[in-house]
């Protein structure tokens, strides 16, 4: 059976297109893989920053709690002092 030059040419063209597409797919896969790696690094960095922010917020909460406790003490002292002054003559002689 003789070889068909047209079929042989078409088969070569199809093979070439398949190989080109496979190479392009490999390149694109490599790009996607690289992008995913970069994204993982960014997510890891953001995760660390969120953890640091959480720690800072906890410290801020402690400071606010301390301030509120101190403010309540000051308010109590002021109420006691004002209560002690009620009914006293505060006009100068």
Image: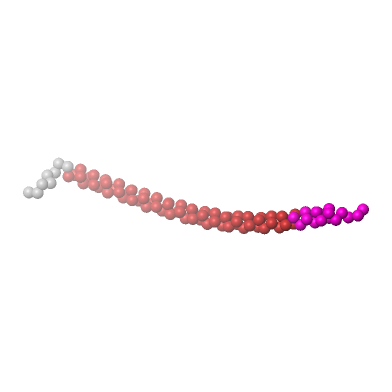
x and y, in percent, of residue 37 in the image: 60, 57
- Report how many numbered discs are placed on residues in the image: 0
| Residue reaching furthest to the right | 1
Of 60 and 86, the residue lying toward us: 60
Query: Would residue 13 appear left or right of 83 to someone viewing this image?
Result: right
Q: Which residues are magenta?
A: 1-17
Of 64 and 84, the residue lying toward us: 64
| Residue reaching furthest to the top | 87
Res 10 quadrant in image: bottom right
| Residue reaching furthest to the left | 93
Residue at 91 percent across and 54 percent down: it is 2
Does 12 lie within the magenta span? yes
Residue at 33 percent across and 48 percent down: it is 68
Res 15 quadrant in image: bottom right
x and y, in percent, of residue 23 in the image: 71, 58
User: Main SS type for the magenta part?
Assistant: helix
x and y, in percent, of residue 21 in the image: 71, 55
Query: Would residue 88 appear left or right of 44 to someone viewing this image?
Result: left
x and y, in percent, of residue 38 in the image: 58, 57
Does 78 lie within the magenta span? no
Of 57 and 90, the residue lying toward us: 57
Res 80 quadrant in image: top left
Of 42 and 50, the residue lying toward us: 42
Residue at 52 percent across and 54 percent down: it is 47
Residue at 27 percent across and 49 percent down: it is 74
């Amino acid at each position: 059976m003789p070889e068909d030059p047209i079929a042989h040419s078409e088969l070569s063209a199809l093979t070439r297109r398949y190989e080109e597409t496979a190479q392009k797919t490999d390149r694109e896969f490599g790009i996607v893989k690289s992008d995913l790696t970069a994204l993982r690094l960014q997510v890891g960095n953001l995760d660390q920053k969120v953890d640091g922010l959480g720690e800072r917020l906890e410290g801020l909460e402690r400071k606010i709690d301390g301030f509120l406790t101190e403010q309540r003490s000051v308010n109590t002292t002021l109420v006691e002092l004002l209560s002690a002054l009620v009914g006293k003559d505060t006009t100068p002689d």
